[in-house]
Image (spheres, helix red, strand yellow):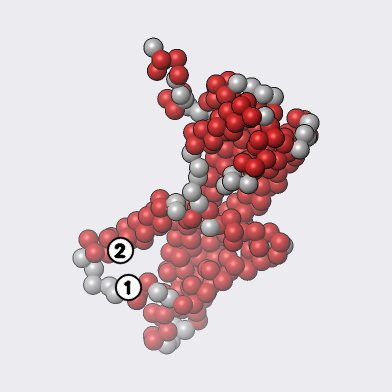
Amino acid sequence: MEWTTIVGLILGFASMGGVLVLGETKTSLNTFIDPPALLMVFGGAAAVTLIGFPSRQLQNLFSILKKPFLSRLEEPSELINELVQLAELARKDGLLALEAKAREIRDPFIALGIQLIVDGTRSEVVTEIMNDEIETRAARHREAKKIVELVGRCGPAFGMIATLLGLILMLGNLDSPDTIGPSMAIALIGTLYGALLANLICIPLGEKLSYLSHEELLARQIIIRGVLAIQAGDNPRVVRQKLDMFLPPRFRERPYAQAS
């Protein structure tokens, strides 16, 4: 589970509550719950999303949006260790020995690469197939980020629309004092909801999606390089050296330094 996303959201809303507590205000939390403003901001954002994107993209959205909350990025060093172990097995017993091992591999992308080289697929074809898989996944990630960014852009706009509607209702009923309070609540709280939707939810989620997508694509590039090195029959030590180039220097294994 990606705990930072959940903690960040809790901290953001808790900070707002802290302002009210530290400000020693006697305002009830119910003051900040306004159904008409909620309907305008969140209903409007949902409407724009439905108008702006086809249903196919929206179906992908929900599965991708789980990533900032539930994803667990595999450490590149763990991937490298797994690929080096596969290289050792191939070096010792031949590529065909990997066929049984492929069924035990948890990562379907590694399993795809291993199955391709076991089947005798040429290296350029392996590269093409695996790169196509990467590009397809990257395209889905870009589509999801566009949707989140659209909601983030439209949230404040619908907050402003709620504000305008509230002001219109208030000015149109100045002779009825009982309606001024609810109308003013729509006007002010609508702007608050729009700002929260954009700045606390959508913009940070869009950035988290970009980061997770980058890390996932980096992991897949490591896998492609490792699979091709295994197919070429490289020494496991050479495989590790090739793959360690993807890591920052402080995370690379230093066999020669350890030996000395």
Q: Residue at x 53, y 61 (%)?
A: 155
Q: Residue at x 66, y 47 (%)?
A: 137
Residue 140 point in image, percent of width and height: 66, 51
Type of the residue with mark 2? Gly
The correct choice, above or below, for 254 with respect to 80 in the image is above
* Residue 130 appears in the figure: no
Instruction: Say which mark, if any, is on residue 17.
Output: 2
In terms of secondary structure, where does tag 2 sit? helix
Residue 176 point in image, percent of width and height: 42, 87
Camera-nearest residue between 7 and 95: 95
Instruction: Say which mark, if any, is on residue 225.
Output: none
Q: Residue at x 40, y 18 (%)?
A: 258
| Quadrant placement of the C terminus | top left
Q: Are marks 2 and 1 in contact (CB under 8 Å)?
A: yes
Residue 141 point in image, percent of width and height: 62, 49
Type of the residue with mark 1? Leu
Instruction: Say which mark, if any, is on residue 29.
Output: 1
Answer with left or right where residue 1 lies relative to residue 138.
left
* Residue 181 appears in the figure: yes
Q: Give the farthest residue toward the front.
A: 93
Answer with left or right where residue 83 lies relative to residue 13.
right
Residue 212 point in image, percent of width and height: 53, 45
Q: Give the farthest residue toward the top.
A: 260
The correct choice, above or below, for 240 with respect to 70 in the image is above
Answer with left or right where residue 99 lies relative to residue 176.
right
How many discs mark residues in the rendered view?
2
Camera-nearest residue between 54 and 63: 63
Q: What's the CA distance linking mark 2 and mark 1?
A: 9 Å
